[in-house]
Image (cartoon, grey):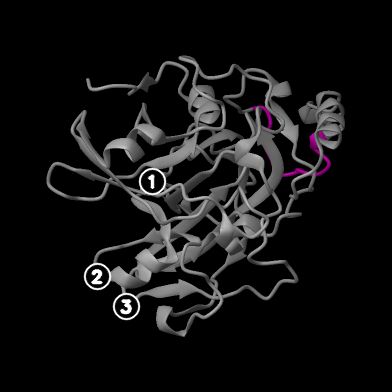
Amino acid sequence: MAFRSFLSIALIWQASLTVADPKLWQHEWPQTDFSRSSVGDWSEILSGGPPRDGIPALNDPEIIQASEEVRISAREPVITVEIAGQAARAYPLRYLTWHEIVNDRIGGVPVAVTFCPLCNSAMTFDRRTRTGVLTFGVSGKLRNSDMVMFDRESESWWQQAIGQGIVGEMTGVKLKTLPSWMESWQEFVARNPKGLVMAEPAYNRAYGRNPYRGYDSSARPFLYNGEIPPHGIRPLARVVRVGSRAWPLQRLAEVGELREAGVVISWRAGQASALDSGHIGKGRDVGSIRVRDGQGQDLAHDVMFAFAFHAFWPEGRWMLSAQ
């Protein structure tokens, strides 16, 4: 999905409203049980432009030693996943921007590493469920601008930001979220000189380029018709979400570290925004976040846009000052 003009987006949005009907989706999704859903209003689900699998998810990617990687520039963001007993792995946003989902296995843990550019949401899930291990793809649908994933086993639809089934047999099922975080490539390598990294996929894509140039400076998000955040917070301002609480990234950048609500959140400069410059590695510095508990253990969290937090956690708590 490329960054298009607001006119093009508006046309897609208007067209989507006329086809937000499961009866019209059934031909593309014959195995999806649309009688089971947690979506109250089908018009919330819009076409993002590409069809099902138009954005190709990756399965079992090639993994190489970090020391062998020469394409990634120092400030480029990667999603880091560390599982006990296994070498740390980095999943570069230069690839996830174009594929959005990576189905991988780290040791004995099947994982789905996901990135939704429109929400800046980077979440890693355990793919094991009560019915078995799932394999995820990109549906081409959006809800509150957030990617709707689907699993190939039941063809149920899943909301990426919350890791939960919203349509089909798996409605209401919650995936286990694994601790992962976005940091710069140089940070990952410095901490993990023997770490691993996902190699460049064998697709014809402009890896390293940002098809959403200038997006995180926009006044409003794409394909979003919901409420804007309260407290005068800019819709595309980044917030650190831990559970149902959100800390403005700007607040973290000003103090460097916060100890509140039982968590320790630290910020350090050096990571480029993947949604700013035309080249991901040249984006403005938004810094890197690490979230730990009082014992120093990493906690699952997300660094997402404020509008997305408000959309999926409308009763969530905004951590705007010392609590």
Given residues 170 and 39, the one toward you in this image is 39
The quadrant in which the C terminus is found is top left
Where is residue 29, by image quadrant?
top right
Residue 288 vs 203, above or below: the answer is above
Q: Is 139 positioned to the left or the right of 252 in the image?
A: right
Mark 3 neighbour class, 10 Å CA radius: few under 14, some 14 to 19, many 20 or more? few
Q: Are marks 3 and 1 in contact (CB under 8 Å)?
A: no
User: What distance separates the C-alpha of mark 3 from that of mark 2?
Assistant: 16 Å
Residue 254 place in picture, x, y as percent: 32, 36
Given residues 128 and 16, the one toward you in this image is 16
Return the mark for residue 177.
1
- Of the two numbered discs 3 and 1 on the same chain, state the one appearing first in sequence: 1
Disc 1 marks a residue whose amino acid type is Thr
Disc 3 marks a residue whose amino acid type is Pro
Residue 10 place in picture, x, y as percent: 83, 29
Residue 185 place in picture, x, y as percent: 43, 66
**Which residue is disc 3 drawn over?**
193
User: What distance separates the C-alpha of mark 3 from that of mark 1?
Assistant: 26 Å
Residue beneath the point at 20% across and 50% down: 297
Residues in magenta?
25-35
Given residues 155 and 237, the one toward you in this image is 237
Q: Secondary structure at mark 2?
A: loop
